[in-house]
Amino acid sequence: MSSLLRHSGLPISEAMAFGLSSALAFAYLPCIRINGLPLISFRMPPRAIVKGLRRQLGLAMHFETFRSPADGTARLDALLDSGKLVGLQASVFWLPYFPPDLRFHFNAHNLLVYGREGDEYLVSDPVGETPVRCARSDLEKARFAKGALAPKGLLYYLSAPPPAPDWSRLGRRALARTAHIMLHAPLPLVGVRGIEILARRVERLPLAGGGARARLYVGNIVRMQEEIGTGGGGFRFLYASFLQELASVAGYAALGELAGHLVEIGDRWREFALAAARMIRGRDALAPPRLAALLRALAGEERRFFRDLLRAARAWAR
Amino acid sequence: MREREVPQEGNSTLAGHRKAVYAAGEDGRLRLVPSSGWEVEEIVTRQAVDDLARRSEEAHARALSGESSPLEYHMYRARMDLDLLAQTTGIWRWRVRRHFRPRVFARLPLALKARYAEALGIPVEALERAE
């Protein structure tokens, strides 16, 4: 997303794009299951992130989904041939340039296509260090994968260059929005309360039969936290980086302090991951109540943090 | 996380790739630092991969002993489950489950087999054998 804007003349870092679109969140969605395990997310769904950024920055951005894969591919080719950069949503399982062990059926992955050479696309993927190539048939399969969060060939592009942003106004709004999502979401599965519900669920994991199921369950949480997206620590470090950046471009120093606090919370998340991994490996005895206690402590810290964030956003307004 | 604390543990699951993580430098500012992997990630990824491998091995054994059709094995080999295969092919779950029965699977018309093969990303001939 940030590379899409950078290429169209608005220098913006990934952290800035993430923060301004109020992408940081927490959601525990037991009704959406992937391989029998609930979906746990540390950010908003990708579509919401992209749309959040469009609204915030006032971008002339277009979204298209397709019923037929052939139409989707033809449209992508047409856009590329007219010199556009195109963002896509795709399933990582069908992308051949991913390491095989990381290829799961995970549909909510975003990447950027910036050109085409014959039957190969030139792809800039936020996960990799360098641009990669992807064959047409593979990309088509990845874009039209089915299942939870199916991309339906979603593509997006800018039809006009982005206007110059007013960082303080945008920043203030984005901070308040994120704090509201984490503290006052209408659904208890979202935000800080979602972490607490997850803690309760972890506490009650059955240990029957050696606890294999419980191990998979906590492993899934850690995977969603560390493996998905950039930065680790469930995107907390990425958001902290956004706060620092916003503090310097908008000249509001209080945010720098909050960033420091959030980095500590990110470290706590990593400690949770470490404790969980040791239990999965059998180095420590499997003790779901201990993990639940860590999650509760995290929920408490995040509640405090987001209250401070909301206060800072309001103080800024005056 | 401090810059010097960024784990460089050479995860085999990353297959030589590196991923970027945010870490604070001496001045306290966060920046992107390449990491060759963290053992914790390796453990959870390996766990998920092993679980998928276990399911596909069990289905493989069932297919060889004639308890189940090769379709079930190939589904797990493609890291799918019943819900995902049903959604990808557009065939109802109960029908897919029925096609796990070897005798039903053997009489499946080519068109249906082709739909499964397409969804699983393998040729039809491969779908018919549990190898």
Image (cartoon, coloured by chain):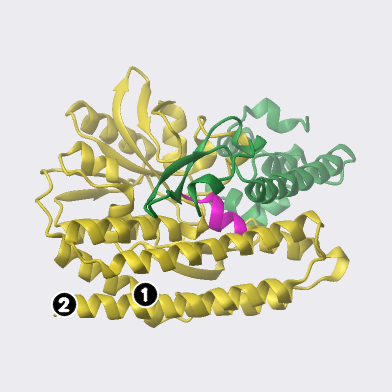
Q: How far across and down, in percent of the image, does residue A128 sit?
A: 45, 35
The amino acid marked with disc number 2 is Ala
Q: Residue at x 40, y 37 (%)?
A: A125
Q: Residue at x 80, y 62 (%)?
A: A284
Asked if A108 appears above or below A252 in the picture, the reply is: above
Where is residue A134, by image quadrant? top left
Where is residue B64, by image quadrant? top right
Q: Label 2: how many residues lie within 10 Å, few (<14), some (14-19) or many (20+)? A: few
Chain B: give its colour: green
Magenta span of residues: A221-229
Chain A: give its colour: yellow
In this orientation, which residue lies closer to the viewer: B119 or A61? A61
Q: Residue at x 55, y 57 (%)?
A: A224
- Check disc 1 and report its element: helix, strand or loop: helix
Query: Which image quarter is the C terminus of chain A in?
Result: bottom left
Find disc 1 in the rendering and name its residue: A181
